[in-house]
């Protein structure tokens, strides 16, 4: 079971996400909700990639025009 995401960089809307908070963790049942275009489907792709070991799920969601891409 995934307990916590430490960081996400250059995937979809997540240009540079870092979770330093201990209270930001997943439990047996965790609901994720938000407005359209705010990253819910991107999170599902990340979870699917982690569960299958197949990075193809997130390769197509690379963030475009990010300053992090230029380093």
Image: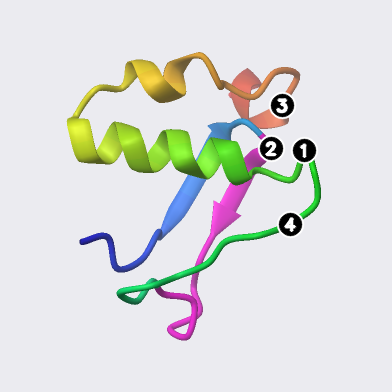
Give the residue number, with chain letter if any, for mark 1.
Answer: 37
Q: Is residue 44 above or below residue 21?
A: above
User: In the rendering, at what x and y percent does residue 29 appear?
Assistant: 38, 72
- Mark 2 surroundings: few (<14), some (14-19) or many (≥20) residues within 10 A: some
Report whether 42 appears left or right of 7: right
**Which is more N-terminal, label 2 or label 4?**
2
SS assignment at label 4: loop
Give the residue number, with chain letter if any, for mark 2.
Answer: 13
Report whether 16 appears left or right of 19: right
Q: CA distance from mark 1 to mark 4?
A: 8 Å
Q: Look at the magenta stretch and give its main secondary structure.
A: loop
Residue at horizontal 36 percent and vertical 66 percent from the top: 4
46 and 28: which is toward the camera: 28
Give the residue number, with chain letter if any, for mark 3.
Answer: 66
Residue at horizontal 31 percent and vertical 32 percent from the top: 49
User: In the rendering, at what x and y percent does residue 43 appear?
Assistant: 51, 44
Give the residue number, with chain letter if any, for mark 4.
Answer: 34
Q: Are marks 2 and 1 in contact (CB under 8 Å)?
A: yes
User: What colouring does the structure picture have?
Assistant: rainbow
User: In the rendering, at what x and y percent does residue 11 appear?
Assistant: 55, 32
């Amino acid at each position: 079971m995934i307990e916590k995401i430490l960081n996400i960089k250059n995937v979809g809307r997540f240009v540079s996400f870092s979770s330093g908070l201990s209270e930001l963790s997943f439990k047996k049942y965790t609901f994720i909700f938000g407005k359209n275009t705010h990253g819910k489907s991107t999170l599902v792709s990340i979870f699917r990639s982690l569960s299958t070991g197949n990075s193809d799920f997130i390769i197509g969601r690379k963030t475009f025009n990010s300053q992090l891409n230029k380093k």
